[in-house]
Image: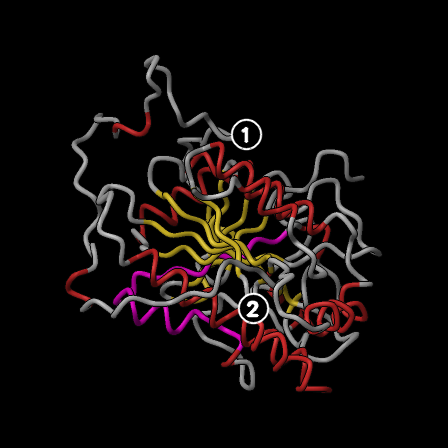
Amino acid sequence: MKRPWSSLAATISIAFALCLCGGCHTRGAEPKPATPTATPKVVLAPHRQQSDLPLAPPAVPPGTERPQERRSDGSSACPKPFEHGSSAPAEPCGALDCRAFADPVAALKYVLDQQHPLVLGVGEAHVQRDVPLAVSPTRLFARLLPVLCGTSRDIVIELWLGRSDCGDRSVEQVAQAQKPITSAQAPTNQDDFVELGREAKRLGIEPHALRPSCDEYRAIVKAGASDVDQMLTLVAQHTAALAEQLLQRPEPADRPLVITFGGAMHNDVQPRPGQQAWTFGPELDKFTAHRYVELDLVVREQVRDTSAWEAQPFYRHFSKDLMPTRTLLYRQGPHSFTLVFPKAKDTP
C-alpha cells in the first residue's frame, strides 16, 4: 500500500534546494531555480515507441465533464483556482511574443490550449532570505493546480526523500554538503514544496518525490568538490526517469499530462552551456515527440539586477512596473514560456 504524501513528506531529511536561478553550480553563486527531490529508485520499464504515447489531445466532447471531475455526490472534484480565468483577450506587451493576461489562470490555460503538452515542466526561482515574498511561486502554483485537475494524474516534485538503510553516514554527509547552498534560501521553501504535494493529492493528482539509491549518495560524498554537480545531475536523471515511467502507464487515457515542479534550470528545453547534465528538458522533449513544455514562474518582487537574472531571456524586456496588475507571458522558444505574476497587492 502506498503511504500518503503526508507520511512521505515526514521522512524528508535532505536539506532543500541546491540552487536558484542559473549559474548556481558554485556555492554562493546567484541562482536560477533548482531543487532536489525524491522517490524510490526508479526502474524503468522498456521504453515504448513514441507512436505508442498518447500524442493527440484527449478526445472529450465539448461540454462533457470527465468522470474524475465529479465526486460521488455529484459535486465538482476540481474546484476553481484562486483566479477563475478571465475571458478577456490578452494584450501585447512587447518582445518575445509577450502577452498580458487578466490573471495567471488565463495565462496557464493559454499555454495548455496552445501546446497540448504531455509533460509540463514547471520551474521556479527559490525564495531567498534577503528577498522575502508575500507569497512564494510554489504557493502560487499550488493555487493554480485546479486548472490541471482532471487533466493530470501525476506531479513529480523535486524533493529528496532521506534513507535510513544505507548503513553508513552518506545521507547525513550529503545533507551537510548542501548547507552552504541552502543557508541563503528562505527556511519556508521546503514546507512550500511539501504543501504543494498535499494540495495535489487533495485534487487527485498523485505527488511523487525522488529518492536516490545508497550508491548514489555515496557517489556524491566521494565527489568531494564536485558534489553539487553530482546532486544536480541526479535531480535531472531521476526526474526524467520517473516522468518517463509515469508516461508509459496505459491508463487513464483522458489524463495523460505529467507535471514536474522544481528549480527553473532542470526544466530548460535548451540548457545553457555546461549545464546539459543538470537538465531533463531535452530528454523529455525527445521522449514525448516534442510534447514537452517548459514553464518558468517568476514573482516580480524576486527580480533583481544581478547576473543571474540578467541572463534570463525575458529580463531586458521586463520591468517590475510593466502592466503591474496583469500576468505577463513571454515565449522564449517554440515550447518554452516564462509566466510573470502580477504585482503583489500588499507590495508598495
Q: Residue at x 35, y 47 (%)?
A: 112
| Above or below for 166 versus 224 | above
Kindly identify which residue carries mark 2: 265
SS state under label 2: loop
User: Which residue range is magenta in the image?
Assistant: 278-298
Give the camera-side residue of 199 and 65: 199
The amino acid on which the numbered mark 2 sits, given as a three-letter code, is Met
In terms of image quadrants, where is residue 275?
bottom right
Residue 245 in percent (x, y) is at 34, 61
Residue that protrudes farthest toward the front in the picture? 167
In terms of image quadrants, where is residue 79?
top left
SS state under label 1: loop
In terms of image quadrants, where is residue 110?
top left
Kindly identify which residue carries mark 1: 82
Q: Residue at x 40, y 67 (%)?
A: 241
Lower sequence index among marks 2 and 1: 1
Quarter placement of the N terminus: top left
Answer left or right for 111 relative to 202: left
Give the camera-side residue of 38 and 266: 38
The amino acid on which the numbered mark 1 sits, given as a three-letter code, is Phe
